[in-house]
Amino acid sequence: MKLNMLIGVLVFGLLTACAEPKPTLTPLQLQSMQTRQFSSSVNRTFASTVSVFQDLGYSITSADKASGLISAESAANSDAAKKFWLGIASVEQTRATAFIERIGKKTQVRLNFVAKTETSSGWGQKVRQDNAIIDASIYQNAFERIENAIFIRSN
C-alpha cells in the first residue's frame, strides 16, 4: 500500500512539474479574445458556426437556435503508453461552446474552448481536469473560418 502511495505521489509530482504557468487574462481581455461580431443574420451565423465546428473535427452534442447555444466536443485521445507503463488510463478531449445573439444590427458570437483530461488508475481512482484554452490564435482561426462560412452562405 505504501509503495502504491509513493508511486502515486511521484507520478503526480512529475505531471505537475511539467505544467506550464497559465497566463492571466482579465475578464475583459478574455471576452475580447472570445467574441466577434458579424454583419449577418443570426440564422446564417448559427449555421456557419455549426459547420465550422464540424470542419474542425467536433461532434455537435447540442444546438439550440432559439437560445443561440451550440455545444460540441472533439474525438477522445487516449495515452496507451501511460496505461501500459504506469497502469493509468488517460483520455483527453476538447469541448467547445458558442453563444450567438443579435446585438443591434450585428450578430455576436462568443466561443469557448476547454481542454478536458480524465485520468483513472488501476485502483479505481478517477480524476478530471478542465483547462480553459486561452491561445488567441485558436479563437482567431475559428472566427476566420466562421467569417468565410458566412461569406459562402451569403452568395
Image (tube, rainbow, N blue to C red):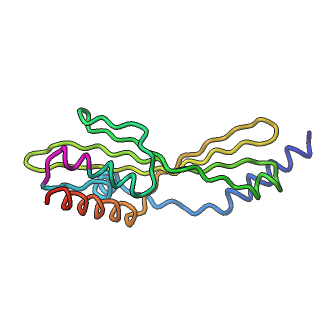
Q: Quadrant of the N terminus?
A: top right
x, y (%) of residue 142? Answer: 34, 60
Q: Using the rendered view, name the quadrant where residue 139 is placed.
A: bottom left
| Closest to the observer, 46 or 29 | 46
Judged left or right of residue 4, residue 134 is: left
Judged left or right of residue 24, residue 115 is: right
x, y (%) of residue 58? Answer: 45, 50
Q: Using the rendered view, name the quadrant where residue 62 is placed.
A: top left
Q: Residue at x 38, y 52 (%)?
A: 53
Q: Residue at x 42, y 63 (%)?
A: 135
Q: Quadrant of the C terminus?
A: bottom left
Q: Residue at x 14, y 47 (%)?
A: 41
x, y (%) of residue 108? Answer: 20, 49
Q: Residue at x 73, y 47 (%)?
A: 89
The vertical placement of 137 against 132, above or below, is below
Judged left or right of residue 74, residue 50 is: left
| Closest to the observer, 151 or 99 | 151
The vertical placement of 151 against 53, above or below, is below
Q: Main secondary structure of the magenta part?
A: helix
- The span picked out in magenta is 40-47
| Closest to the observer, 25 or 83 | 83
Q: Does residue 97 show up magenta in the picture? A: no
